[in-house]
Image (cartoon, rainbow, N blue to C red):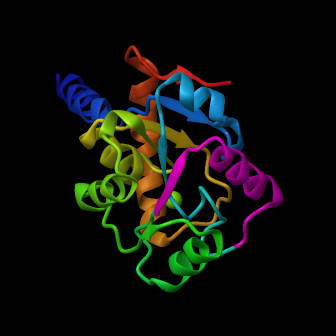
Amino acid sequence: MAADSSFAILQFVARYVRPRARVDSLAQLSPELLSQRGIRGLILDLDNTLVPWNTTRLTPETRAWLETVREHGVQLCIISNSAGDSRVQFVGESLGIPYVSKAVKPSQRAFRLALAEMNLSAEQVAVAGDQLFTDVLGGNRLGLFTVLVTPITRKDFIATKVMRFLERLIGAVLRRVPVETESLT
Ligand SMILES: [Mg+2]
């Protein structure tokens, strides 16, 4: 009985952290796939999505991908929970992409700022990030198209490691309930 009710709670939580799609890397989010879904703007997480955790290093593949999506007119905005502004600012400014730091995802505030910055509605925007409880939950709360990206590295902020444990717990439930997650590959 107790096991049943804990499973029900996990199922409830899973509904809010279920991504619409999963990809192994940003490069799999082609402009064609985005436009098929009417996506004209993309909110990007920084750590372990755009760059390895706690760095500002963009791989040549990521740079090429950024170039391609921008050429196709997809607007971009970085939102990061990173406590310091400097890395987010450095990456945003060097790429010419607007950014919001100290975003406190899954709070909706930063996501709303990003929508306003891009002048797009929630239906026109996707969010790509590596964490269920910040990127996916925050995006789902606003009705964005949420894409879970496999983290670039296994290095993480200590609090994130705790969240990874909870993600694995939820992951087990996500596999058991009917999942609407679409495959983009
Ligand atoms: Mg991240």
Q: Which residues are the magenta region?
A: 57-78
Instruction: From the viewer's side, name the closer residue of 119 and 138.
Output: 119
- Pinpoint residue 108: horizontal percent, then vertical percent: 24, 54
**Residue at the location (47% across, 52% down)?**
164
**Residue 118 covered by magenta stretch:** no
The number of discs equals 0
Taking the image as shown, residue 77 lies to the left or right of residue 87, namely left
Give above or below for 183 relative to 101: above
Horizontally, is 132 left or right of 62 in the view?
left
Q: Quadrant of the N terminus?
A: top left
**Depth order, front residue of 117/11:** 117
Q: In the picture shown, does residue 70 fall above or below 31?
A: below
Question: Residue 88's spot in the image, x, y percent?
Answer: 52, 75
**Residue 168: x, y in percent?**
47, 42
Q: Nearer the viewer, residue 7 or 19?
A: 19
Tell me the quarter of the image containing the C terminus. top right
| Outermost right residue | 60
Position of 37 relative to 77 (above/below): above
Residue drawn at x 56%, y 33% as measured from the top left: 22
- Left or right relative to 92: residue 124: left
User: 140 or 34: which is nearer to us?
Assistant: 34
Question: What is the x, y in percent for residue 131?
Answer: 46, 50
In the image, taking residue 129 as reference, residue 117 lies left or right, namely: left
Q: Is residue 65 magenta?
A: yes
Residue at (61, 52) in percent of width and height: 151
